[in-house]
């Protein structure tokens, strides 16, 4: 069932949690879940683009994820590199813009170069923007933005700080989805989610299919967003 376009979120952000448990439930190693997670992310990108969502941000790797065992981090890096190699041409062919947000300084040169190439290739596209948060932390981003204001000698105001964020120029998050049953934000898009509607599902990330995305969008479409104000006159809700 479709959602009327005026009820769609402009910016959807997703915390893709539960790959490890999904694999464990099947008696498999965590990497099996991450591989399935990549497929689920791919499906989400396709579905979001078809819906006409403007910006989709996915949390692929947090700064805290560096604390995971070296073998798991290495596997994730390998998966990201492969997914990039495999998917960029198709994303480009579909007019999608790909960007990465986060601290790239700890990633291997080959990966950061591939990220830069993908961004350059797709920069002029006019379809959905896909932001991949990798090496990302919301607190890091805010500190970095404040530091940039300081260096530029700019007073720190809401608009000055927003202009220094990784997401400068893009709409704030309307709908934040988290799979995997936890109810927390985990240092993701802290500033941009100030007024986001928060949608939590127990589904583990690899199970998050098109139907699950539809359910989240329908839930969002029924929300009444007040941004700290009051309900619209004549509206009986409080
Ligand atoms: C959470 O599962 C997921 C991650 C740590 C990030 C990795 C995400 C993917 C591989 C999806 C693909 C993304 C892209 C953009 C290619 P978890 O390991 O925290 O699961 P658990 O909570 O069950 O242990």
Image: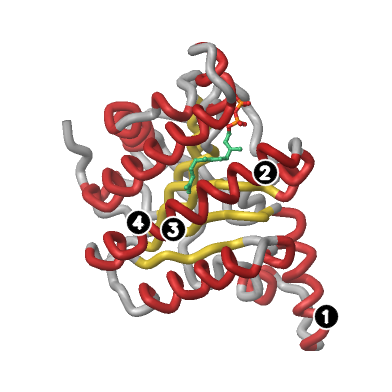
- Identify the residue under disc 1: 150
Q: Nearer the viewer, residue 102 or 184?
A: 102
- Tags 2 and 4 in contact by the CB under 8 Å rule? no
| Relative vertical location of residue 70 with respect to residue 22 in this rendering, above or below | below
Q: CA distance from mark 4 to mark 3?
A: 5 Å
Dot 2 or dot 4, earlier in sequence: 2
Q: CA distance from mark 3 to mark 1?
A: 35 Å
- Local packing at callout 3 (Cα closer than 10 Å; few below 14, some 14-19, many 20+) is some
Dot 3 or dot 2, earlier in sequence: 2
The response on whether ligand 1 sits within 8 Å of label 3 is no
Q: Residue at x 70, y 45 (%)?
A: 187
Q: Residue at x 76, y 69 (%)?
A: 144
- Tags 3 and 1 in contact by the CB under 8 Å rule? no
- Identify the residue under disc 3: 84
Any part of residue 235 in sight: no
- Identify the residue under disc 2: 73
Position of residue 204 measured from the top left corner of the image (x, y, whole percent): 49, 23
Q: CA distance from mark 4 to mark 1?
A: 39 Å
Q: Residue at x 27, y 43 (%)?
A: 47
Dot 3 or dot 1, earlier in sequence: 3
- Local packing at callout 2 (Cα closer than 10 Å; few below 14, some 14-19, many 20+) is some
Query: What color scheme is it?
Result: secondary structure
Q: CA distance from mark 2 to mark 4?
A: 21 Å
Q: CA distance from mark 2 to mark 1?
A: 34 Å
Q: Nearer the viewer, mark 4 or mark 1?
A: 4
Q: For the view shown, which residue lies furthest in the left direction?
A: 1
- Identify the residue under disc 4: 87
The response on whether ligand 1 sits within 8 Å of label 4 is no
Label 2: state its secondary structure.
Answer: helix
- Local packing at callout 1 (Cα closer than 10 Å; few below 14, some 14-19, many 20+) is few
């Amino acid at each position: 069932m479709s959602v009327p376009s005026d009820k769609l979120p402009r910016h959807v952000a997703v915390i893709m949690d539960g790959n490890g448990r999904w694999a464990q439930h099947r008696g498999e190693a965590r990497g099996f879940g991450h591989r399935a997670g990549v497929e689920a992310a791919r499906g989400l990108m396709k579905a979001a683009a078809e819906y006409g969502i403007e910006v989709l941000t996915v949390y692929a790797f947090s700064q805290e994820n560096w604390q995971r065992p070296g073998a798991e981090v290495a596997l994730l890096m390998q998966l990201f590199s492969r997914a990039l190699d495999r998917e960029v041409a198709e994303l480009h062919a579909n007019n999608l813009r790909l960007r990465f947000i986060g601290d790239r300084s700890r990633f291997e040169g080959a990966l950061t170069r591939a990220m830069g190439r993908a961004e350059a290739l797709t920069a002029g596209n006019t379809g959905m923007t896909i932001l991949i948060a990798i090496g990302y932390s919301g607190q890091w981003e805010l500190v970095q933005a404040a530091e940039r204001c300081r260096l530029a000698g700019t007073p720190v105001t809401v608009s000055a700080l927003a202009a220094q964020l990784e997401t400068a120029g893009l709409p704030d998050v309307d709908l934040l989805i988290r799979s995997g049953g936890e109810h927390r934000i985990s240092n993701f898009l802290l500033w941009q989610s100030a007024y986001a509607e928060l949608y939590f599902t127990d589904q583990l990330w690899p199970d998050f299919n098109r139907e699950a995305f539809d359910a989240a969008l329908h839930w969002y479409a029924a929300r009444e967003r007040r941004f700290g104000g009051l309900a619209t006159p004549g509206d009986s809700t409080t």
